[in-house]
Amino acid sequence: MIKIILLRLLLPVLIVFPSVNQITPGLYVLNPSAGQIVAGTVEVKGSVPDDDFNYAEVSYAFSDETTSNWFLISRLDQTVHDETLALWDTTTITDGTYWLKVSVYRKNGSIIELIVEDIRVGNYTHYDVPSATVTSAAVIAETPSAGETIEPTLVMKSLPTDLPKNPAAIGEDDFKLSLISGVTLAGLILLVIGVYVLFRRVARK
């Protein structure tokens, strides 16, 4: 009887607060997002599906290419869920706008591809952060195996994020604090010198 009462009390809590370890199945990229400005080594984070998984590849291409030449960043021999898919070193390429692609090769010969467009690499170029008002979408294009018909799927992507604040930047409050500290220190030094000179004069008399 007590167990039944406890279960009834805990049931609403379990419904409102589901398990934090729950994983959304499918192919998607959490970072970077379309339109995002990146620099240095970029963590490509997301998930690849378990269904008939053989291997996956993460690659990039320059967006201005008429026939895109994709360059391999990393190959995955195991599925990944909400974790790092690859580390993309953007310091080895020129600044510009790129596309990022995650390709999943299945054992049945079919291929699922997800492309994140308009990623701007700015290691040496300053870009204005876009004020996006809509959520961008990336299309998963799947190559079906023989006799199989598959509809394309839309995956919603998050809005571009702002660049992290520069830790070396000096704000107005920091400048005021430094100025006050400098004036106080200078006043203390002058006070010590004045007291020293006064004692010297007294000692001579």
Image (cartoon, rainbow, N blue to C red):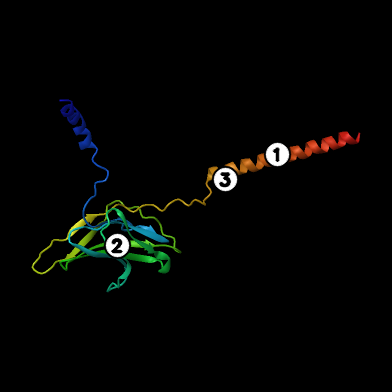
**Where is residue 94, by image quadrant?**
bottom left
To which residue does mark 1 refer? Answer: 187
| Amino acid type, mark 2 | Glu
Q: As drawn, is 146 to the left or to the right of 184?
A: left
Q: Is residue 56 left or right of residue 90?
A: left
From the viewer's perspective, is 171 left or right of 134?
A: right
User: Where in the figure is residue 173, as x and y percent of width and height?
Assistant: 54, 42
Residue drawn 85% across the image and 37% down it:
200
Quadrant of the snapshot with the C terminus: top right
Q: Residue furthest left?
A: 147
- Report, in whole angstroms, how far the alpha carbon at label 2 lies from the one at label 3: 41 Å
Q: Earlier in the sequence, mark 3 or mark 1?
A: 3
| Residue at the spot 32% in from the left edge and 62% down from the top edge | 118
Mark 2 lies on residue? 117
Mark 1 or 2, nearer chain start? 2
Decide: few, some or many residues near mark 1? Use Cα within 10 Å; few <14, some 14-19, many ≥20: few
Check disc 1 and report its element: helix, strand or loop.
Answer: helix
